[in-house]
Image (spheres, rainbow, N blue to C red):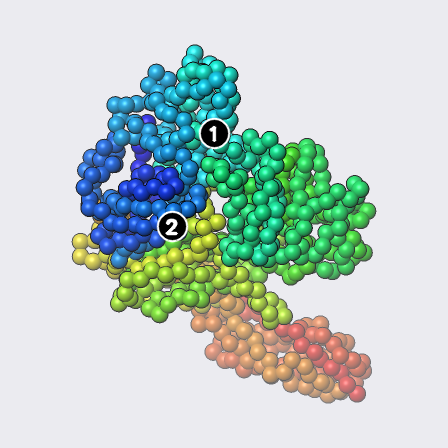
Amino acid sequence: MKRLLPLAIVASSAFLAANAQAAAPVLRDVYPRGAQRGQTFTLYLRGEGLVQGAQIRSTLPASFSRLARSKNPFAESNTGGGMRPDSVLPLLVALKPGTPSGLYPIRVVTPEGISNVVLFPVGELTEIEETESKDPKQANDFPEQAQRVETGVVINGTLAGVESDNFAFRAKAGQKLVFEVEGRRLGSAIDPAIEIFDAAGREIARNDDAEGLGVDSRVEVAFAKAGEYRVQIHDSKFSDQAQNFYRLKIGSYSFASGVFPLGWKRGETVEIALFGGNLSAPVKVKTDFHSKSEFVPVRVPSSSALPFLLAVSDLPETIETADGGGPIALAEATVMNGRISGPGEVDRYKLRVEPGQKWVFEMNAASLGTSLLDATLTVRDGAGKKLAVGDDGNGVDPVLPFTVPDGVKELVLHVEDLLGRGGPLYGYRLQAMQQNPDFSVELGTPFVNVPAGGTAQVAIAVQRRGYSGALKLTIPNLPEGFTAAGGHVPPEAAAQRFTADNTGRTRERSVITITARPDVKPQALDLSVLGEALMPDGTSIKRVARGPGMLVAVRGVKEKTFSAPWLDMQLPMAVSAPLPVAVSSSTPIVRIAQGFEYVLDYKISRAPGAGPVKVTQQTAGLVGNLRILKGEAAKGDNGSFQVSTNFATPVTTFDMLLEAQTEIDGKSVIIPSPIVTFQVVPGYELHLSKMAAEVAPGGKVEIAGNVRRELTFEGGEIRVKVEDLPDEVSCPEVVVPSGETAFALVCGAGVAAKPGAFDVRIASAAPETGRKQKAEYKIPDLNMKLMVNR
């Protein structure tokens, strides 16, 4: 195989832009890829910016000692010559006695910033290397070139595109061996497949996507005869991936393919059943959920397999029990742990409700990584009428906001697999919460380096759970010396999708920029992002964003980026070196009247010798009837964008991000500006001196008011009149001339006017707006009360 070294471990342009600093450390590869428990070994970190004084951040129970840069294992491989300065960091690592098997994150911190995370496994088996990784002359791409290995080992190797790696071993008669590949679970982008062959080249076993392992592979083989055998590993799609490493285990150990229940309540201890795999019977393990983390690991005792990760909740938990074939009672705000035990099975739960109540039904299954269930959740009334359906068509387990219709006192929830499958591995966690509409927040940026005197961006996704209004995202623990901008999420209606198919359940994106003062000192800290929504009753909903831990891009159609939220990281941040290029606007907040344009000027600042810069823009959040065009060419490092609205553009707040595309040290980078926030507002506002007026039959009443025009509104006169007047009452229209603000409506009641309290509307319009396209501009009417009294 030919070792491929990735340019970076990234998954999105937003992440790249947030980490464009050439001097910030980057981890591309580690050697070795894992270690045996109790060992002391030399660890080589490879990447960029691994300068003297670099520190290691890791949960690995070990001591890390810096070694001199002497022998470089990467130089012995076929990675090419010419190592760049500060590209290898050698460390002597001594694992502490009793270090548990598992995965541990490793990150580098330098005065120039923080690196991405790599996962480092510790296990029970002896560690060896694929020889071709070091010496291309010792190729193992074909059966006759198979590398000879012993059993009871884990082989660290890599795959390049269409190649296969072959390993020869000897098995005893009656011996059982497990062949397991750790790839995607560690952050590799390959989709491994393995085949086992006898000495004659006949295939005797194969596996691709083992139960309980996602896309990773595992198979156990019982060898009837003693002799020579061969295991072959390749990418099942023969794809060419940047992160292309694997760990192939060959040994005799117990493993499970599933676990149940899939989680439990924080602070409690519960018996977890591990089943399947090569276990003759389920193994039950008392598991302690006294953890601050969102996940708790559990494994078969003394197994070399990686642990399962169980979800941790703060709600009461229960387990599905048979109830004579009828629907099972589902308690509110309680997690029901169930499973679809066989093909075609439908689990049913009944819930007492009242008309008008607002509920959210949520399932967790495939998203946990411990279930094969492609869940569908159907809500029916007690008579069996279908009321709502939620499935995971977008790759997320069902979250279904629901308002109880009139006349409905009982709901029956139907849980099933979308494809009608079932079995022990089809577990789920279901909960029903009576609550107002909600939302959740996830970070699309695993960490951020903010250049001194510069700006970095943080990508954020908001999943609506019944809430359709505007949100604001902030960083509450941002220290002195830094400022944040942006984080506005327009209301769902601002997108003007004109469909109600997914109302209250859309996924929105937003961006926050962080700008550092030029004099900030080097530092590394952990930030949090908070989402807040103001409700009509004055209360607010606040939700803390969940971080991805790490992101690894996976090439291919419909492939998903690898992330590790179980690392329980929010937003690690550090200060990095100043950049030679910056782009900014002198206007951080812009108010623009509906139907008009605004020219946003920007300026490029660059150090001497900086290369060409191209400036682009993007808006965070969807806003309908909005057009943004590049402005007219300007001299030097100045430029502009024209933001155009029309009368149908919604009144809302959205963010614009300017991005400077340039090269630094031969690398293409994207440098963001501080967010510019746009407030689309009505062209004018009407204000009344009072919202209720009284008039007697035969009398008159004056309703005074004033007009406030926006600076960007180019309309002239404004006409004001009263609509929905009762019989025998009149209020002549008034005209507020251009340049004037005050007006008075005079309403008269005839002697035959009937007494009563009437709801009337104060309507207004600007017939001339100064636009080329002649059109009357109106704002929403004001409501007031007009009382006719005797």
Rendered residue at 35%/66% (across/down) = 482
| Type of amino acid under label 2 | Pro
Q: Residue furthest front?
A: 97
* 476 on left or right of 313: left
For mark 1, what is the residue?
252
The residue tagged 2 is: 61
Find residue 571 and report its horizontal and vertical position in percent: 41, 57
Q: Point out the residue furthest to the top here.
A: 200
The answer to whether 435 appears left or right of 201 in the picture is right
Q: Position of residue 203 (x, y in %)?
A: 48, 17
Q: Is residue 286 visible?
A: yes
Q: Is residue 750 rendered to the left or right of residue 711? A: right
> Image point 70% across, 86% down: which residue?
700
Q: Sequence order check: which comes first, mark 2 or mark 1?
A: 2
Residue 119's place in the image compared with 587, above or below, is: above
- Marks 1 and 2: in contact by CB < 8 Å? no
Residue at image point 42% right, 39% down: 123
